[in-house]
């Protein structure tokens, strides 16, 4: 046994963790090596002094109590959470209610967005017809009164977030009175008001990718075929250009209506 | 293991934790907060893989890691080797030293050496456990113990020679 090997076993010998045979070998080395014996004696003495004479700090009572209070506080919070989860998942009515609430919360916005059927053309037509009547009763609509196309365009852009690509801004036959932002079927819409003699005509433009226009009741106007409806003696022409729906509401005769339509429709 | 059983299992080792905490921090408030932080962390993890005395080693390991995170502890903390041994005629006199002398001498050791001596000599843990707790090897624990005892022996003998003059020994408490 070398000195290094012997010293590696000092601890185990001091604490009685060696087998009889290992202990015998180590003691034999200590008999033969005064230096190792010296080192072992010092180690034993110091270890013994530390074990039996140095202070052993026992945990004070207030620390024990503080720790128990810590644990109680932690377990109260954890316990409440655990109880709530347990209750939610084990009580059938509560489970059903919770699930229903969660499903509704997720599904309702999606339903609104994806499942609500697009507005039927008839509903759009009757709404703009009602708006036309309201306009006549309350004329002029409140708000500023821009008459310059550029001013109207800017107003649309600010109020609606879009400015419809309208290129007809009135002429002698169809005088542009004003433009204003409004709503059609809860969608933001641009409205222009034209006047022909005593007759008021309105043009509504709003985004309507999902609006389906019926195949019947089409009026043939110079190669175009807009949808024509008559509501309370007002004629309503409906057509789509790209993603926008256009509606003209008027009491004009059909020939004049065709003229107005072509002015607005033709590029 | 129920919550109550977990708490009871932890509190069995409270004295061992507090003793080491006191010896490393040398301050009651620091020791208490170190013990509380250790137990908080222990309760937040599973104790099942640490049955019996393994739990004590686990807790002490957590505590040493917690302490090292907040203090810069040199893993060795040792001064240069000194081959000087206690003189035989003085050695027997070491037994006459008081508890205060021993405590003061222990406090002069660097933290890592002090922790090694406390775990090994005072608590009587085997070298593997001490190595596991302090995150080192059994061989380094052996070397550290030899050096710690040599330093202690020197300090204690100086104490015997002169109660006023303490050696500015290598490895003196760096704090």
Image (spheres, coloured by chain):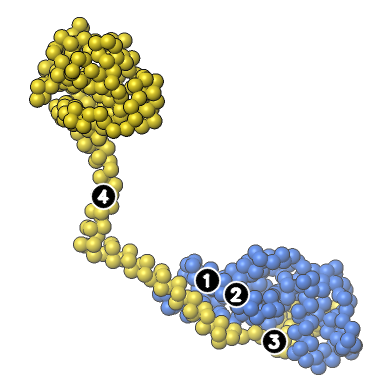
Label 2 in the same subunit as label 1: yes
CA–CA distance in space, label 4 to label 2: 47 Å
Residue A225: x %, y % from top left:
18, 12
Picture residue at 80% right of the left edge, 80% below the top = B152
CA–CA distance in space, label 1 to label 3: 26 Å
Residue A51: x %, y % from top left:
70, 85
For discs 3 and 4, the disc positioned in front in the rendered view: 4
CA–CA distance in space, label 2 to label 1: 10 Å
For discs 1 and 3, the disc positioned in front in the rendered view: 1
Residue A256: x %, y % from top left:
18, 11
Residue A150 seen in the current view? yes
For discs 3 and 2, the disc positioned in front in the rendered view: 2
Q: Residue A20: which quarter of the image? A: bottom right
Query: Disc 1 marks which residue?
Result: B40
Of A168 and A114, nearer the camera is A168
Query: Disc 4 marks which residue?
Result: A103
Q: Which chain did the renderer colour yellow?
A: A
Residue A209: x %, y % from top left:
27, 25
Q: Which chain did the renderer colour blue?
A: B
Label 3 in the same subunit as label 2: no
Query: Disc 3 marks which residue?
Result: A55
């Amino acid at each position: 046994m070398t000195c290094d090997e012997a010293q590696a076993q000092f601890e185990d010998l001091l604490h009685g963790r060696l087998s009889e045979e290992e202990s015998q070998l180590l003691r034999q080395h200590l008999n033969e090596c005064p230096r190792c014996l010296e080192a072992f004696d010092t180690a034993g003495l110091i270890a013994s002094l530390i074990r039996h004479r140095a202070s052993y700090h026992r945990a004070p009572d207030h620390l024990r109590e503080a720790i128990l209070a810590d644990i109680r506080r932690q377990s109260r919070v954890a316990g409440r959470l655990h109880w709530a989860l347990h209750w939610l998942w084990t009580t059938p009515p509560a489970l059903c209610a919770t699930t229903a609430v969660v499903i509704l919360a997720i599904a309702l916005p999606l339903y609104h967005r994806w499942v609500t059927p697009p507005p039927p053309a008839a509903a759009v037509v009757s709404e703009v017809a009602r708006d036309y009547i309201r306009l006549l009763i309350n004329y002029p609509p409140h708000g500023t009164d821009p008459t310059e196309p550029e001013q109207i365009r800017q107003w649309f852009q600010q109020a609606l977030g879009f400015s419809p690509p309208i290129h007809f801004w009135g002429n002698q036959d169809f005088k542009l009175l004003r433009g204003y932002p409004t709503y059609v079927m809860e969608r933001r819409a641009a409205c222009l008001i034209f006047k022909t003699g005593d007759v008021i005509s309105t043009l509504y433009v709003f985004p309507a990718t999902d609006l389906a226009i019926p195949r019947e009741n089409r009026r043939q106007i110079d190669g175009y075929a807009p949808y024509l409806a008559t509501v309370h003696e007002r004629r309503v022409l409906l057509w789509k250009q790209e993603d926008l729906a256009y509606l003209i509401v008027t009491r004009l005769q059909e020939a004049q209506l065709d003229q107005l339509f072509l002015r607005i429709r033709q590029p | 293991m129920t919550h109550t059983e977990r708490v009871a299992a932890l509190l069995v080792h409270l004295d061992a934790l507090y003793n080491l905490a006191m010896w490393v921090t040398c301050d009651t408030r620091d020791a208490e907060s170190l013990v509380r932080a250790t137990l908080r962390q222990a309760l937040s993890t599973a104790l099942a893989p640490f049955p019996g005395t393994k739990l004590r080693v686990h807790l002490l390991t957590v505590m040493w890691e917690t302490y090292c995170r907040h203090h810069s502890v040199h893993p060795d903390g040792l001064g240069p080797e000194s081959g000087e041994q206690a003189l035989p005629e003085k050695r027997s006199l070491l037994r006459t030293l008081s508890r205060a002398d021993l405590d003061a001498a222990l406090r002069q050791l660097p933290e890592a050496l002090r922790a090694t001596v406390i775990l090994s000599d005072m608590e009587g843990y085997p070298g593997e456990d001490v190595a596991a707790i302090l995150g080192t090897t059994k061989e380094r624990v052996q070397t550290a113990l030899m050096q710690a005892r040599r330093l202690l022996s020197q300090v204690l003998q100086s104490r015997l020679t002169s109660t006023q003059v303490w050696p500015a020994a290598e490895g003196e408490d760096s704090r």
